[in-house]
Image (cartoon, grey):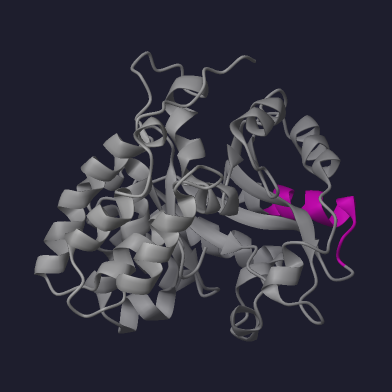
Amino acid sequence: MMDWTDRHCRVFHRTLTRRTLLYTEMVTTGAILHGDRARHLDFDAAEHPLALQLGGNDAAALAECARLAEDWGYDEVNLNCGCPSDRVSSGSFGACLMGTPDVVARAVEAMRGATRLPVTVKHRIGIDDLDSYEHLSHFVRTVEAAGCQTFIVHARKAWLSGLSPKENREIPPLRYEVVQQLKADFPHLTIVLNGGVRSLEEAKQALVWADGVMIGRAAYQEPFLLAAADRDMFGEGTPPPTRREAMEAYLPYVAARLEEGQPLNRMMKHTLGLFAGQPGARHWKRTLSEQGHRPSAGLEVVRAALSGVPDEVLDACPLPDEG
C-alpha cells in the first residue's frame, strides 16, 4: 500500500506479530535503479519475514531489482500486477499488466533467473472488459509456465479509467468465488486471497480453501487485530502482546529515528488506529495528531497520548479464538 506500509509501519506491525509475512510499499524499478537505492531498499532486521514489492514492466530492470532484493536480504520478491492508479497505468505497469500476460511471464522468468528468492505475483481477477474467468485462468497459466508458483489475487476487477484507486477498492464487487475456482483449477499453485478481509475470523474462513490470506487496510486501520495472529493463525503458544507491550517495543525504534532527525509524526501516524473502538482512542489520536507534527516533538508526546488510555485497555490481551 503506497505511502502506508513504509519501514516505520512495518516495524510497528512487527511488535504485534512475529510470523506474519509483511510487504513493502510498491517500489518502481526506476526508483531503485536510478534513485536513492538505500532509501528504497533499507529495512530494519526486525521486519523479517519481508517481501519486496516491485512495480515495473521491463524484464531486465525487474531482474536487476530481484537480484538486489536478494543482496539486501529480503525473503521474497513480488511483482505488482494489481495497482490501478492512473500514474501506475500510464507507466504501463500495475494492473494494466493483466492485459499482457506474456510480458508478465517474461518478467517473471527473468526475475527467477536473477535470484534464488521466491518470485510471486499480485494481481486482480480482471481489468476493464478483460474480466472473464477464461482470461484470468489464461493469465495464471501463462505466468505459471514462466515459473511462478504463488499468486496473490485481489478478488475484484479493476477499471483503469473512470474509477479512482479508492473507488477501485470499493465499487467493483468482491468475487471470492472466482478466486476459489482458481484454486480448484490450479490446486498445485499457492493461491492467496486478497481484498475485503477485515478480521482473523474471516481469514480463517477463507483458509478452508485458500492457501493464504492478505489483509491490508484492515490491519492498518485496526492494527491490534494482528496481535492475535501468531496465536490464532500460526498456533503459537506464547501469549499475544498487549497494546502497552507493543508500544514499549516500538518506542526504542522511534527514539533512534528521532536521534537521526526524523519527525515524530512520520513514525506515529501508523499507530493512530491502535486503540480503535476503545476508551481513550480519541485522546490518543488527537494528542498525536495535534502535537506530533511539531518539529520539537519527542517521546513526551507519546507518553501524553498514552496517559489518556485506561490501563485496562493498555493491558488487555486479544480474546482467545473461539473458532
Q: Toward the viewer: 108 or 273?
A: 273
Q: Toward the viewer: 171 or 56?
A: 171
| Image location (x, y in percent) of residue 65 | 37, 66
Residue 13 in sight from this viewpoint: yes
Q: Toward the viewer: 94 or 214?
A: 214
Left or right side of 57 for 178: right
Q: Residue at x 49, y 43 (%)?
A: 279
Left or right side of 273 for 260: left
68 part of magenta stretch: no
| Image location (x, y in percent) of residue 3 | 46, 70
In this view, 99 is above or below 11: below
Label count reads 0
Which image quadrant for residue 231? top left
Which image quadrant for residue 122? bottom right
Q: Residue at x 20, y 58 (%)?
A: 254
Q: Residue furthest left?
A: 259
In this view, 50 is above or below 36: above
Q: Residue at x 84, y 47 (%)?
A: 175
135 part of magenta stretch: yes
Region of the chain picked out in magenta, as a range? 130-142
Q: Residue at x 54, y 53 (%)?
A: 221
Residue 6 in sight from this viewpoint: no
Quadrant in which the C terminus appears: top right
| Image location (x, y in percent) of residue 204 | 64, 26
Predominant secondary structure in magenta? helix
Left or right side of 105 for 70: left
